[in-house]
Amino acid sequence: MQYEHIINSGGAVTVARSQALAEGVELTFYNSLFVIRGEVGHPVPVDNRLYNLNVIAEGPAPVWLSGEANLRAEGSVVVHASENSYVEARASSTVYAYGNAVVSAQDDATVYARSDSVTVTATGRTRVFLPQKGQPGSEAAVDGLKDSATVIQEQA
């Protein structure tokens, strides 16, 4: 059985988890699917409440990802990732990465590193933007560049 739920707000995460518990469903990555949609201009927070579950962000709402949560970003969604979170960025998604976030980007994804403790791997036509030297994020770890992925360092 696959437990699926559309998330349109931060409160919907709690409701979905409670509903699953009430139905006696023990959620795992393999039996869950949480799709983050929401509305433009109304960010949806995703945190440890969805740790180790199957989460896909489609937008149009921006997503604020924190804690040890992880998600797959698809389409043109914007994700702000921090605090040890993990993002698999696909298609034309955009990720702003802070404080120990890990981003695996592919296709036409765009990543903006905003902390030196960010780690990014990039394939496809991904673009990784680093701030100018001396700014937070300018020393972010960018590993595994493949295909035509590029790193662009902002100039002073």
Image (tube, helix red, strand yellow):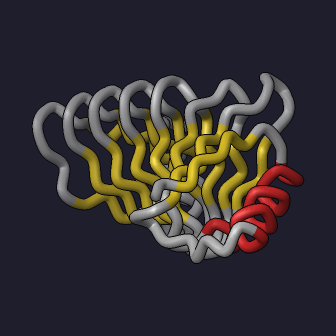
- Rendering quarter of residue 97: bottom right
Residue 141 placement (x, y as % from top left): 36, 65
- Residue 58, how many percent across, how many down? 56, 32
Horizontal and vertical percent position of residue 36: 65, 41
| Residue 45 coordinates in the image, percent (x, y) | 77, 53
- Say if residue 34 shows up in the picture: yes
For image coordinates 59% across by 68% down, the residue present is 69
Horizontal arrangement in the rendering, residue 122 relative to residue 9 (left or right) = left
Give the answer, above or below, for where 23 lies relative to 146: below
Q: Where is 79 relative to 66, above or below?
A: above
Seen at 48% across and 54% down, the residue is 2
Decide which of 21, 41 is in the foreground and name it.
21
Quick one: 63 or 18, which is closer to the camera? Answer: 18
For the view shown, which residue lies furthest in the left direction? 147
Q: Residue at x 65, y 48 (%)?
A: 80
Residue 106, placed above or below residue 30? above
Residue 100 visible to the viewer:
no
Quadrant position of residue 151: top left
Residue at image location 82% in from the left, 62% down from the top:
14
Residue 52 to residue 56: above or below: below
Closest to the observer, 8 or 133: 8
Q: Quadrant of the C terminus?
A: top right
Number of numbered discs present?
0
